Amino acid sequence: MSVLSLESLCLADNDSPSSAEDLDLEDKWDTDLEVDEVKKTSKDTSTAEIYLQACKLVGVVPVSYFLRNLGTSTMNLNHHGLGPPGGKALAIALVTDMHITNLELADNYLLAEGAGYLLEMLKANFTIQHLDLSNNHLQSEGAECIAKMLLDNISIKSIKLSGNGFIEDDAKSFADALANNYRVKELDLSHNQFCGRGGEHLGQMLANNEALEVLDLSWNHLRMKGAVAFCAGLKVNVTLKHLDLSWNGFGNEGALALGEALKFNNTLVYLDLNNNRITNEGVGMLCKGLEANDTLRSLMNVLVNENFVQLLDLTCQEHPSLEVQYGGVGGFIAKKPPKRLDPMKVIQDYLDERKLRLWDFFRKIDKDGTMRVPVADFRKAVQQSNIPLDRYQIEELIQRLDRERTGMVDYRGLADTRKQMMRDHRWQLRKVESRQKKEKQKSERILKTFQSAVEANTPRSSMVMSPGGTKEDSSGPQHFSATPLSSWHHIVMSNSSRYSVTNLSSEHIHLPMLGGSTHQRPTSSPTMRSYSQPNLMDDSPRYPQSKPSSAQGMLSDSNPNVDHTKLSPTSNHLTRSSPALNSKQPDTKTKTTKVKKKKKRVDKNST
């Protein structure tokens, strides 16, 4: 792709030749009543001349609509078939334009080459604020050009890139470019091919970006993995207000992650979730997130069922300002007929409530005691009883009892049917329990993945190193755990001494010995706890906190100036405040050995 050279391709106003007609036209102006209008016309004419000469240079037909609308703030050139050469001619003309703020170039087959010319133009044009490059087959090469432009341009506030065939790796380019971009407020990446990894990159973009307010990701392929990673970034985002996630196949897993994100996100106002394969279970998970959300005002959905409406009513009672728009109550789920209960199960429940046996029920029907009754009598008896069975359930039961169409129902067949019903019922219960267990495990894995993605997407600027980790030797690296800024006070390392600790609690931290001198206790503060870890490298003997009097006496004799009540069995090299730990102690091991040898000699003499 050739590079657009602005200096060589831009035509200055003084370089264009003046015709005799133009000179005569200038001589006719003998008044200065319309000086401003003359200047504006001259400016537009110069832009038009530049465009005409650029079209002649690259060999394309000029677009008359562009020439007729010069000087307006919005230039709509959608569906004009410009192609890369037409984009090059347009870029040459727009270098010096100062009127157009909204440039629409959708569906012009610009390709990456034509987009490169336009983006090169934006290095000199700072007037254009809204750019539409949708459906131009930019693909990965065009994505790289746009990402580079976003790093340098200071005027673009809105950019539409729908339907350009962007793939997974292109999402990383946009994420890197927008991570520190504070100017772009609206971004349209719909109708592209972002999948799982694309969702991860876009989630990182949301976590790091602090300017984006409108994002359209509809008609992509995020699905479960990409949805969970994206929602992790949404959880920590602080600026996004309008989000379109329709037609992404989130499923119940994505709804679970989105519900978790909505519990913490406090900026999102509009959310579109049309056609995301979210069932009743997923709706319940989403509603749990809505219960804790106070900012969302509009939730878009399509055809819903009665369960969704019931859950929505409960949610709206706690959040009256929430507006949920849906196409109506219907669709595949709502039109699905309700599942009928097993008629034999209904009869058994009826008998259990009244503490009756199946034989008691059948004996009332069997007047002759033959253990067989006609089908008509059985149907009449069931209809006249209070058993809650409809006509369809009764006919289903009769078909099961009279499979050979003999017109008779016997007790043995009724009893066998009850046994089969009970086996089926137990199997259904086990199946439901197994499904619930798997769904629970799956939800736990999703939540774990979601939490890991949140930790990965959390901006480092909002974290501070806290003294929660184990400390190593002062010569090696110090390990700390990451904690939010609001959780801990700062530990300040001063230059005047080796360690300086501020905001400490009443339980002070002992500082190391320098040159054998003892240090005084630092000032304490009730706002923070002290930390003490065991010194695994210390070979000196350790004493329990409740020491016997003999041990206390030995310690006090070695150094009477040390307050030994502050010594701890978990003291390390940072907590030693006295050389008493290194003082020579009585050789108790040698005395014990001598006693044992003497005892052995006594035993030998006695034998």
Image (spheres, rainbow, N blue to C red):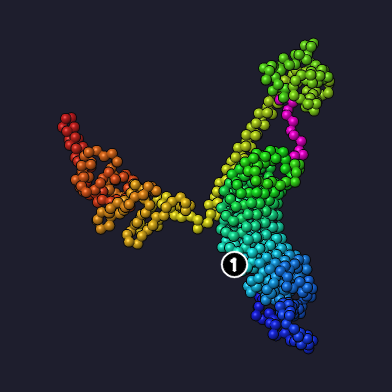
| Residue 190 in the figure: left or right of residue 567 | right
Res. 51 image quadrant: bottom right
Tell me what residue is drawn at x 76 percent, y 84 percent: 29
Q: Is residue 514 visible?
A: yes
Q: Is residue 65 above or below residue 516?
A: below
Tell me the kind of residue under disc 1: Leu
Mark 1, residue position: 151
Image quadrant containing the N terminus: bottom right
Q: Which residues are magenta?
A: 334-345
Q: Which residue is at the front of the view, 133 or 154?
A: 154
Res. 183 image quadrant: bottom right
Tell me what residue is drawn at x 62 percent, y 44 percent: 290
| Residue 154 in the figure: left or right of residue 489 | right
Residue 561 percent coordinates (x, y): 22, 49
Question: Tag 1, which secondary structure?
Answer: helix
How many marks the image carries: the answer is: 1
Tell me what residue is drawn at x 42 percent, y 52 percent: 489
Q: Residues within 10 Å of mark 1 (few under 14, many from 20)?
A: some
Q: Is residue 320 above or below residue 233?
A: above
